[in-house]
Image (tube, rainbow, N blue to C red):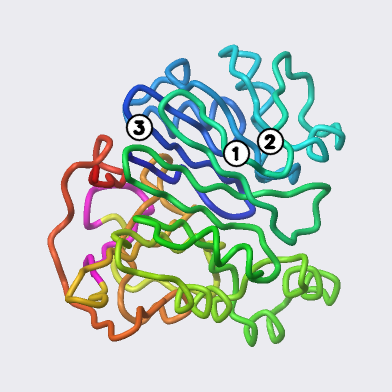
Amino acid sequence: MRFASLGSGSRGNATLIEAAGTRLLLDCGFAARELEQRLARLAVSPDSVDAILVTHEHQDHIRGVGAVARRYGLPVWLTHGTRRSGRLGEVADTRLLPPDHKPFRIGDIQVSPYPVPHDAREPVQFVFQCKGSRLGVLTDAGKVTPHIVAMLQACNALLLECNHDTQMLASGPYPPSLQRRVGGQLGHLSNRQAAQLLGSLEHARLEHLVAASERAQQLPPTGPRGAANGCPGDRAAPEHQLSGPGNRLVRVLRVDESISPGRCCRALSPGEGATKLPLPQGGCRKTPSPTGRMPQDSLSLRER
């Protein structure tokens, strides 16, 4: 199984997941042309995607869903509440998620939806499994519930929302209504909540942790831009791993929507404390870039 975040934040969210002969797009918060450009950076054609899954109806998650689904004839999986919102536009093939959030299959991938507290009609997040590899995704949730903790156990990779620093949110130039919404129980996970969630999970199999954040004003640059790989707007930063129990190494990455399309996974560098998510008994050390990526920019999970 391989995955690549195409972007995260209020400007748009999308994640590509593939395993064996199946390729899925989780959310499409970018206009169709922008999505095509981001996929092209991964040498992926949109017509190779098998389906779109939608977490909820907010614009930064569905902006391009209707156009992409119509252009490439893709089915769109979503909850009844999300469909009833009427915000997706005209979609010829919509398919409701199974009742009671039961797992189901799309091609070679088992998809397990689970409910989350967020200010949408019927929001969900997903866990994806194939041949022993397990990817958990959690964004757009206002608090951590016992069910969320149960769903995200024993993952090989996590894409985890780290939305804001609570003190910076409270003291920043944000209207009170936005502060209440973002920081409320139907809003977004703070960095501290994300770290607490991570600490409550079993880490024996965890290999990759992607910290999905708003490109934050809260996460300043730590090095010259674009020097590492020639991508305009990218940040040069050493790659790091966290050492988990049993001397296991867990790659920690941050999704940064400010970098060039398609190249949205990069190493989290020291000093970006807002999204440093320490594992128990963990330490940090420099390592070379991993191999086995969907051309250059995705993360690959070893089959087990």
Horizontal side, residue 95 vs residue 36: left or right = right
The magenta span reads: 227-241
| Few, some or many residues within 10 Å of mark 1 (<14, 14–19, 20+) | many
- Mark 2 sits on what residue? 63
Q: Which residue carries the number 1 mark?
A: 27
Instruction: Indicate yes or no whether the magenta region holds residue 111.
Output: no
Residue found 64% across the figure and 87% down from its top: 167
Q: Say which residue appears at 18% left-offset and 53% top-offset.
A: 290
Q: Is residue 40 left or right of residue 96?
A: left
Residue 214 position in % (x across, y down) = 56, 62
The crowd level at tag 3 (other Cα within 10 Å; few <14, some 14-19, many 20+) is many
Tag 3: residue type?
A: Ala
Q: Is residue 228 magenta?
A: yes
Kind of residue at disc 1: Asp
Residue for badge 3:
19
- Dot 3 or dot 1: first in sequence order is 3
- State whether residue 59 is above or below residue 187: above
**For residue 242, which quarter of the picture?**
bottom left
Say whether disc 2 or disc 3 marks the residue closer to the N-terminus: 3
Locate residue 153, reporting x and y percent. Answer: 46, 63
Residue 52 sits above or below residue 148 on the image: above
Crowd band around label 2 with a 10 angstrom C-alpha radius: few (<14), some (14–19), many (20+) = many
